[in-house]
Structure formats: structure tokens, C-alpha cells
Image (spheres, helix red, strand yellow):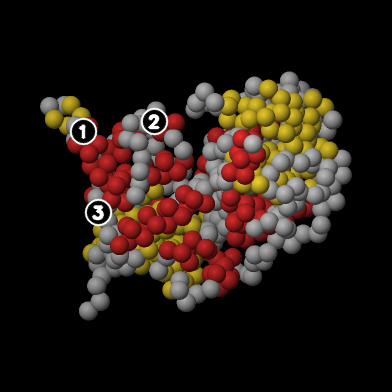
Amino acid sequence: MDAPYAIEMVNITKRFPGIIANDNITLQLKKGEIHALLGENGAGKSTLMSVLFGLYQAEEGVIKKDGKEVKINNPNDANDLGIGMVHQHFKLVQCFTVLENIILGVESTKNGILQMDEAKAKVKALSEKYGLQVDPDAKIEDITVGMQQRTEILKMLFRDNEILIFDEPTAVLTPQEIDELMQIMKNLKAEGKSILFITHKLNEIKAVADRVTVLRRGKGIGTVDVASTSKEEMSRMMVGRDVNMVVEKKAAKPGDVILKVENMTVASKLHSNNAVKNVSFEVHEGEIVCIAGIDGNGQTEFVYGLTGMEPLVDGKITLCGEDIIKESIRQRSRNMSHIPEDRHKHGLVLDYPLEYNMILQRYFQQEFTTKAGFLKRPEIRDYSEKLEKEFDVRSGQGPITLARAMSGGNQQKAIIAREVDKEHKLLVAVQPTRGLDVGAIEGVHKNLIAERDNGRAVLLISLELEEVMNVPDRILVMYEGEIVGELDPKKTTVEELGLYMAGAKRNVFIDANTSEIEESESVDTAKGKEEA
């Protein structure tokens, strides 16, 4: 007789106003396997896992653990059954330490006093066992996103969970952190843990998963073995059509300078050194320039300085021939659109409906506001519906859906729709495909190239190596707050790009008007010249 499944979700149906998020879905997780859950943005993946974790209650269907039917009313019930979850948007208290977050809810006390030493010893032992090095005493607000994710994983392991749910775990990680996470998942599997892994990234499924269940628009399409199924087949199951994995574009035709950055320096909030140091470059109309680099090398602070969210220590920014250093964010947005890195913090008002989020930077314009200062609600709704249709933004109740109630991918598509449609000369796109499925990524890349071909300047900041190599016309590499190289994506390789990103290689930065890239030299060679 076959061993019972570690987890079996049978005929699960979950409804929200205006939408059936899960429509009669069955999912079976074997003991000791990594089982991927694949689907488009809004397909119902996170909802299904939230049902398993007790955050939602299904209207129909049953959940079995080890062959026995169980009732999971809340996350405490899930934890009691050995089920843990790392959420797409982390559930951490920012002003608490790593250790305090890990033990929160399962604190050990003696005479009313927290027993922190025992907890810290257990956390250190788990860190060493699974390769999850963290500083237990560091505050969450001061550590990287990758470290925050390790904290979430340690929360699960601290509670001795046997069923581990990872919801889009790599959406906010660097390529190096993704490789580390893949190895951690393999180690957990070797320990006998059973893992449910939500992702859009087919390469990651191929790297670690044993089987994959595909959802599309709330319905289960099927479960297949990963080893015997190609990425193209999985992609077709996910979106219902063939997806072009190759970015198609004509040669760029750069025109006038739209953005000119001169000697830009931005302070760091984490340490006394500057986060951005003496950065200079130009972006022309009709081209896509990408700033590439490992996360944490000044890209975030650079964008804050460019868009007006942080003041400059030094330097000058010229947009469309005008010095914008003293301009407010609203003034800068006249000629600049910005797809922000953090869609929740800087992209959306989560408790506003979708239609209001679509006009956040334009509500005061005559198109949407009367002379008396009242919003033109019919016009706003028509505009929102137009963008939703054009950019395939899916939501349960259309324009009146609260942004908070939408899937992460559809939140991202809403921001992209708003920023691309707004009048601008420069589009600053920071991680625009983060959390998107392959079909949506294809659409975003087409949008960026259309922006370029329509004569706009595009500044792309990306951590995705495949995107960096395929979308831009020029690549600028940022390392420790400096531009250390300019590369032609048609002439460079991923390996060479990696050397620049790691600081092992740099070239003399050239003027944006020249097409020739000067010969690179290694850091060791440069140091030798300096000593000579």
C-alpha cells in the first residue's frame, strides 16, 4: 500500500467578491518532495496556500495530512500540524530583532521572564545546520531582504515545521541569494521536509522541484514530473499559449540627451559612507540604458536621488535640458515616470481602489478634476477600465477593487500601466518584472521597447541577468556606489558581466555619445599601474 500524502487538498473552492480564486483544485504533496505551484499572476496560487495555512477558509473541499482529514481555522492550527509558511510579503516586525521575530508567538518564559539565551542557542544551531547565517541581534529594518527571508525560514524551522510553504521566495532576491536558497531547499528536502514552492520562474522549477502543479485562472490544469517536462510545455500549460522567450527588437536610434547625471553622490542611511559616489552618465531619447549590479550596491539610493525621494550630497541632474535638483517629486514627474522598486511602499495606496491608484500622479489635472476641485468620477472609472484592458490587469471587482486585495503581480501591472501611459520623456523602471509570470514579463519587455521606439528614454534598473542581457542597448554596472563599467550587451557575456558586478573588473567609463567601449582591465592590473 502506498504511503499517504504528507498534504492532500481535495476539491478546494475559495470565492471572493466577483471572482472564484480557487475552482475545485486538488493538490497532493508527497513526503520528502519539493512540489512547485506554477501559474500566472492572479491564478490562485497564494490563495490556495493561504487556505492550507489557515489564513482563508475554503467554501468547499477538504484538507488531509498524512491521510487524515484536518480542520485548519487559523495559522496557529497550521503550526500545530507542522505547517509553516514564508509569505511573499514578509510578516516581520521591523523594529524587533531577528531573534525576537523568530520566537514571536512561541516564547519560552520562566517566572514571567523571556528565556532568550536558550532561544538564541537554538537559532544559531539551526543557522549552522541549514546554512542560514543571520545576526540574531540585528534589527529587521537594518538588514537586507535576503536576510529577512532567512529570518522567515528560521521562524518555520524554530517551530519544527515539517511542511514548508514558500510563496514567491525569489521575487525579491539577487541571483546569488537565489542560488543559496535553492541549495537550502535541497538541504531541507534531504532532512525529510516536504516543500510547496510557489514561483513563476521555470528555471527555478527545473533546478529544484520534483513535480509541478499548474493553475490557470483559478483552475487546476494538471500535475507533471519536472524532469520529463520542458520549460516550453510548462509555460504553455501556465498561460494557455506559446510564449516568446526571446526579446525581439530593432537596433536603437538614440537622439537628443534626455537625462544627464553629473557627479551624483547620495548618502547612505545604514553607514557613514556614501551609498552613491560621483556617478555620471547620459541617457538619450530612443535608447534603453540598464544599471546592473548585485543588490545593495547603491542602486536604490541612486533612484531615490534621481526621483527626488532623497536629497543629493553633491552633483547635478539635468532632465530635458533643465536642472531639476531643486524640483519636488511632483515637478519632476512632469517629464519622468517611475516604476518603483517597492510597489507597496512607493507604488500604491493599498487601501485605495484600483481606479484611484491609476491616477495618483494625475488626479489634479483637468482631465480628472473640475475647476472647483472635485474629482470627475465617471472619467476616472473609464480611464481605469481602459488601462486594465490594455495592460491585462486582473482584479475581482474591476476599478473598485482595493489594491490590497489584488495579487502582487497584478498590483505590479497596474503600476506599469499607470506609468507607461502617463506623459513623460524618461521612464525609470526599477525591477519592473519582479513577481511577474513569463507571459506578463513578455508584455513588460514589449512595453519598454515600444517606449524606446516612440522616442522616449528608458532607464532600467534590474537584478535579472537574463533581462540585463536581452532588453537594454547599453549596460552600466554599479559596484559599491560607483559605475565601474559600460558594456554593449551584444558584445559581452554573462561571465564578463558577473566579473564587473563582483568588482573584479572595471573599465574606464566612456562618454555616452561614443559607441566604442574602451578595453577593460582587471582591478589587479589597475592597481599595478597605480603603484608603478
Q: Residue type at mark 1: give it.
A: Asp
Secondary structure category for the residue under label 2: loop
Q: Which residue is mark 3?
A: 81
Q: Quadrant of residue 312?
A: top right
Q: 304 or 315: which is nearer to us?
A: 315
388 sits left or right of 129 in the view: right
Q: CA distance from mark 3 to mark 2?
A: 30 Å
Q: Which residue is mark 2?
A: 139
Secondary structure category for the residue under label 3: loop
Camera sees residue 205: yes
Graded by Cα atoms within 10 Å as few (under 14), some (14 to 19) or many (20 or more), the crowding at tag 1 reads few
Q: CA distance from mark 1 to mark 3?
A: 27 Å
Q: 77 or 374: which is nearer to us?
A: 77
Graded by Cα atoms within 10 Å as few (under 14), some (14 to 19) or many (20 or more), the crowding at tag 2 reads some
The answer to whether residue 213 is above or below residue 74 is below
Q: Quadrant of the N terminus?
A: bottom left
Where residue 103 appears, x then y in whole percent? 27, 37
Q: Residue type at mark 3: give it.
A: Leu
Pointer 3 with pointer 2, Cβ within 8 A? no
Eye-nearest disc, 1 or 3: 1
In this view, which residue lies farthest toward the front?
Answer: 532
| Mark 2 or 1, nearer chain start | 1
Q: Quadrant of residue 459?
A: top right
- Which residue lies at the image location 47% right of the left edge and 77% below the top edge? 228
Secondary structure category for the residue under label 1: helix
Q: Residue type at mark 2: give it.
A: Lys
Camera sees residue 425: no
Pointer 1 with pointer 3, Cβ within 8 A? no
- Which residue lies at the image location 87% right of the left edge and 40% below the top edge? 256
| Mark 1 or 3, nearer chain start | 3
70 sits left or right of 443 in the view: left
Identify the mark at residue 117; answer none if there is no mark: 1
